[in-house]
Image (cartoon, rainbow, N blue to C red):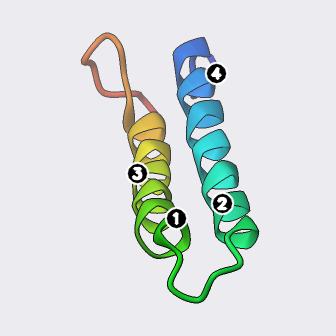
Amino acid sequence: MMPFTKENYILLSIGILIILVAYILMAVDNQVDGWISLYLAPYMLVFGYAELVFAIMYNKNGKKKST
């Protein structure tokens, strides 16, 4: 039995995509006090990493996974 289901992989992909977009937004904003690099991208990073943790812990059935 696989440790992750299809839903876990979809959620992991969404989290990785959010993180990549946030880093790209940080790199593109060339202003020192740019709104995107100071406010938007860091929140996107936090949300992306939280999404990764949620994707790893997500279990559709609500049962504990056996090791």
Mark 3 highlights which residue? 47
Q: Are marks 1 and 4 in contact (CB under 8 Å)?
A: no
Where does the image place residue 46, in percent across and percent down from the top left?
41, 61
**What's the CA distance linking mark 1 and mark 2?**
7 Å
Give the label on residue 2, or none. 4
User: Camera-side residue: 13 or 25?
Assistant: 25
Q: Are marks 3 and 1 in contact (CB under 8 Å)?
A: no
Mark 2 highlights which residue? 25
Q: Nearer the viewer, mark 2 or mark 4?
A: 2
Q: Nearer the viewer, mark 4 or mark 3?
A: 3
Q: Amino acid at mark 4?
A: Met
Q: Nearer the viewer, mark 3 or mark 1?
A: 1
Q: Residues within 10 Å of mark 4 (few under 14, many from 20)?
A: few
**What's the CA distance linking mark 2 and mark 3?**
15 Å
Could you tell which of marks 3 and 1 lies nearer the N-terminus? Answer: 1
- Please, what secondary structure does the residue beneath circle 1 have? helix
- Please, what secondary structure does the residue beneath circle 3 have? helix
Could you tell which of marks 1 and 4 lies nearer the N-terminus? Answer: 4
Q: Amino acid at mark 1?
A: Ile
Give the label on residue 36, or none. 1
Q: Residue at x 66, y 50 (%)?
A: 21
Where does the image place residue 40, in percent across and percent down from the top left?
44, 60
Q: Are marks 1 and 2 in contact (CB under 8 Å)?
A: yes
Q: Are marks 4 and 3 in contact (CB under 8 Å)?
A: no
Give the label on residue 60, or none. none
Is residue 2 left or right of 28 when viewed as pictured?
Answer: left
